[in-house]
Amino acid sequence: MNIILDRHVVVIGGGNAGLCAAIEASERGRNVTLIEASPKEMRGGNSKYTRDLRYAHLDDQYTSGEYSKPELLDDLRKVSGDGFDEKVAGIVIDLSEKIPEWMSHHGVVFKREIRGTLNLNRTNVFFLGGGKALIDAYYKQIEKLGVRIMYDTQVVSVDISDNRIVGIGISGNGNGRTIAGDEFIFASGGFEANREWLSEFWGDAAGNIKVRGSRFNTGLPLKALLRAGAIPCGQERAGHMVAVDARSPDYDGGIVTRIDAIPWGIVVNSVGERFYDEGEDIWPKRYAIWGRLIAEQQNQIAYVITDSKTIGKYMPTAYPPIQARDLVEAAQLLGIDSRKLIETVNAFNSGIEKAGEDLFNWTNAQVSPRKSHWAIPIDTPPFLIYPVRPGLTFTYQGVAIDSTCKIRTSDGIIENGFAAGEIASGNILRSGYLAGFGLTIGTVLGRISGGWNGD
């Protein structure tokens, strides 16, 4: 059975990028169909778990100060390194200053920063009600605009002829169909929920990775595009991966599963050894390195150890910390050799150099790896412990695009095929992450795919 819909845009993916594309295209007079893999109650992809947006701006009503375009580009370079598409990244950064007003016009309500995020109040703006409220506001918009929504529907194939998509194969409710249209916008996320695909790059470790985002981000549309000749872009093992509580669900844990206590303590692996500088410039530029670091440890498990002095210093956690009266009990609870854990903690405590009252300036260069900031002695029971695993938000490998978001192939570009959001994030993000920047990428590229020219 074929469905032929003339003069219309087909959007694949019902998260932020796809919704922005659908709104933009519909407001420009196009007939839009949105295809969403999840059921209605789980719609929104990873976007429903977001809470803030990073954007370039002068001093404005939403933030506490100026955040220039050159500074944002410099921050991106610090976390991602060289090798990203400078032109695409430049467009996202340049146009980012225009999106808060557009978002507000389309029902998104902003608020001041939340507790524990004061260091973001200059660069980022927060949504009242978080990402779920943002998603709901956009769905209200597309429903008013008459966008047709197809839930529980997966894209399984892409048919390309003469550099144009002539149809896509979909599967839903036990039926296979083909949809033809004028333009196709792929905003279907990464493949983080596809364990089989992850294992191609991570091996057995893939089974111990927690997926913070949507269980429906299996990467089937991405795989279909790659089979059809789209050029892959981004590192295979790269992604937005942070430390999350090991007790979190395997999927859909969201932002509340993240552990922000790392700078205030030490992190040891399953044999009681530290393996990285916990006090590196972790927030907002470097916090996303910890997921990958933990993924490289034995059994992909580690433990954040703090003490009672740190209570209230970091964001509240979804699960309470494991408490121990002393390090011997802590080691027993974690299954670590107590002598090794005591040796690690004592070595850390003895090498701390205190510089004034500002804890940020306390360091420890006597241990390896050193701790460059917040080197606070762990000596005041009860000891608080968080078991952590790698928490993957989204993968960076996707498809290459040009400056108009058209998908690149070895023959040039797909004239009527666009990509936006996480499926195109590898053009900009090569490693690491900037808090709130994923939503920026999705919003700008989604709107461009829908017809926005930046005006």
Image (cartoon, rainbow, N blue to C red):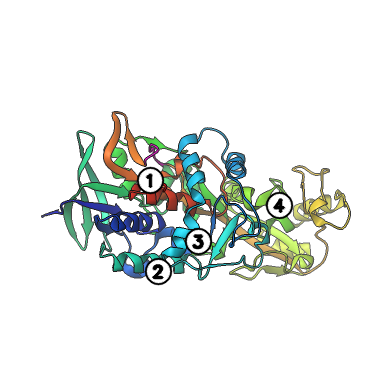
Instruction: From this view, report whether residue 144 is shown above or below residue 387.
Output: below
Q: Which amino acid does label 1 sit on?
A: Asn
Report the side of 210 relative to 39 (left or right).
right
Q: In which quarter of the image is residue 113?
A: bottom right
Neighbour class for label 3 at 10 Å: few (<14), some, many (≥20)?
many
Nearest to the eye among marks 1 and 2: give it. Answer: 1
Nearest to the eye among marks 3 and 4: give it. Answer: 3
How far apart, in angstroms, are the residues tagged by discs 1 and 2?
Answer: 26 Å
Nearest to the eye among marks 4 and 2: give it. Answer: 2
Q: Quadrant of residue 320?
A: bottom right
Q: Which amino acid does label 4 sit on?
A: Gly
> For mark 3, what is the residue?
50
Q: Which amino acid does label 2 sit on?
A: Asp
How far apart, in angstroms, are the residues tagged by discs 4 and 1?
Answer: 54 Å
In the rendered image, the quadrant that contains the N terminus is bottom left
> For mark 1, what is the residue?
453
> For mark 4, what is the residue?
272
**Which residue occupies the foreground of this view, 334 or 61?**
61
> For mark 2, what is the residue?
136
What span is colored magenta in the figure? 398-404
Q: Main secondary structure of the magenta part?
A: loop
Neighbour class for label 4 at 10 Å: few (<14), some, many (≥20)?
many
Residue farthest left in this picture: 1
Neighbour class for label 2 at 10 Å: few (<14), some, many (≥20)?
some
